[in-house]
Image (cartoon, rainbow, N blue to C red):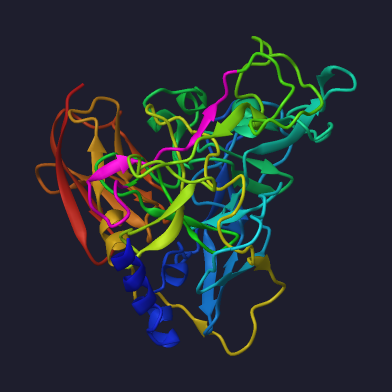
Amino acid sequence: MKKLLRALSLAMLITPSVFAQTNPVITGWIRNTTGITGRHYVSGSSTPIVDASYPANCQAVAYNTTNVYISCSGIPAYIIGPYLDGNPNQGGNNNNIYKFPLTPVQNTGTPTSTTGGTIGVFINGVSLFDYRDGVSYKSSTGADAGGPLGGMGDGVWNRDAVRAERSGFDCAKGHPAMTNYHHHQNPSAFNMDLNVLSTVCNLYLADGLYVIDSTVHSPLIGFAYDGFPIYGAYGYKNADGTGGIVRMKSSFHLRSITTRTTYYDGTSVTAGPAVSTAHPLGEYREDYEYIPTSAATPDYLDIHNGRFCVTPEYPAGTYCYFATVDSVWNSAYPYVVGPTFYGTKVVTTVTSVPTGVTTYTGTTEVSNVAQQNVEVSVYPNPAKDILLVQCKLGSKANRTVELVDELGRVVLQQTLYQGSTICYLDLQTVYDGMYIVRVSDGKDSKSYQVVVAK
């Protein structure tokens, strides 16, 4: 660990201009270079509606010697909706400009709690919310307060959004608060989990920001409001980058309780509902307790749901958060960041980008992100009705996907949009035989042999 800290200190001695050119808080965002717009489903129709006035992903990245400014709509490239709990809202263009520090700082004082609303930003400009849904138990009446879209109660037993609002999440595990589309959890499609908890993907084609892969370090997927990076579910076992790839585990566990009269630290509070089928453990944030990690459990995270470690983008080490999941890839509390920040919460939204900044044009890229973007899976193989082409991380550029027959003719063509992970080839009009799937970004291409057998 001492060597790791020394390496990080040396990295900070690099001149600001050089550091800025390789700093992932500048290079890591998905910038909309193709003019793509958002799309959404409405309940009952699997044909997406194009939101022509809502540009997807991030529109611009600019920086100076201290900060980076991210201009984004808050809308992803993957199709959002529908929200089957009756949520009347739809994500819209929020015209956000986020100000992030180039060098985040640890908070050495009292930790700052996460709050309702945006507490971080994913690399496609979409908001991250924390565990809560804005509803707490209303003990004075002995009944739950509010509803899936309401926000009221006594603030003592706070309801967990990932559990309470599951029926209202779309396939990418997101939903809107007014026009602010957001994720509370790991932003990958429900039907990619090992144990599928929502069937929404059965009717509306699945997509998300990234795909969980247990064999490689998860990609950088965002930044918290203290400026520290957020990764997917898997990382190096040991902080120095050794030990192989393992699932990063939350150190919060469900308490062994039957009544809700105290917090896990022993504090007596106004009683909530007794644990029951109607109010199971995990319904409230206060149902969890934090069990500190030890040297024997380096893959368990700290009380903020992160740790200091080496990552592909930060070879000298950094503090970072992980989007935690359980053994079957269902999201695990506290999900991403929280319940407190590790660093000093300094990220803000501003009304305009200041003068004198440098616009990032993408001429420098984080090498391993570029490599992850071309890691493509084509399945099923053999295929019958439909063929899926999937990237592990939302593509940094639009990719053309072609199905080529044995005579070299292109029989099907689709676009894998920048910021999406998946596209579908409908094989209804394709004859049985051997084909090549060619995936190209205009500069490089990869080919995959597939068999169509109906």
* Quadrant of image for the N terminus: bottom left
Relative horizontal placement of residue 315, taking residue 73 as reference (left or right): left
Instruction: Give the percent coordinates (x, y) of residue 60.
Output: 53, 71
Task: Identify the residue at horizontal 31%, vertical 37% (top origin).
Answer: 388
Instruction: Give the percent coordinates (x, y) of residue 417.
Output: 41, 53
Residue 378 visible within the image? yes
Q: Is residue 438 magenta?
A: no
Task: Identify the residue at horizontal 53%, vertical 51% (top origin).
Answer: 76
Task: Identify the residue at horizontal 71%, vertical 33% (top origin).
Answer: 87
Q: In this view, does 268 lie above or below 54?
A: above
Q: How many labels does the image show?
A: 0
Task: Identify the residue at horizontal 43%, vertical 41% (top origin).
Answer: 293
Q: Does the magenta stretch include residue 242?
A: yes
View extreme (bottom): residue: 356
Principal secondary structure, stretch drawn in magenta: loop
Instruction: Give the percent coordinates (x, y) of residue 413.
Output: 30, 47
Q: In this view, does 283 lie above or below 38?
A: above
View extreme (front): residue: 266
Q: Is residue 276 above or below residue 164?
A: above
Instruction: Give the percent coordinates (x, y) of residue 328.
Output: 38, 26
* Quadrant of image for the C terminus: top left
View extreme (right): residue: 140
Front residue of 435/221: it is 221
Determine which quarter of the picture holds residue 120.
bottom right
Residue 363 visible within the image? no
Relative horizontal placement of residue 368, taking residue 120 as reference (left or right): left
Instruction: Provide the residue span drawn in magenta.
Output: 236-256
Front residue of 378/223: it is 223
Q: Is residue 81 above or below residue 17?
A: above
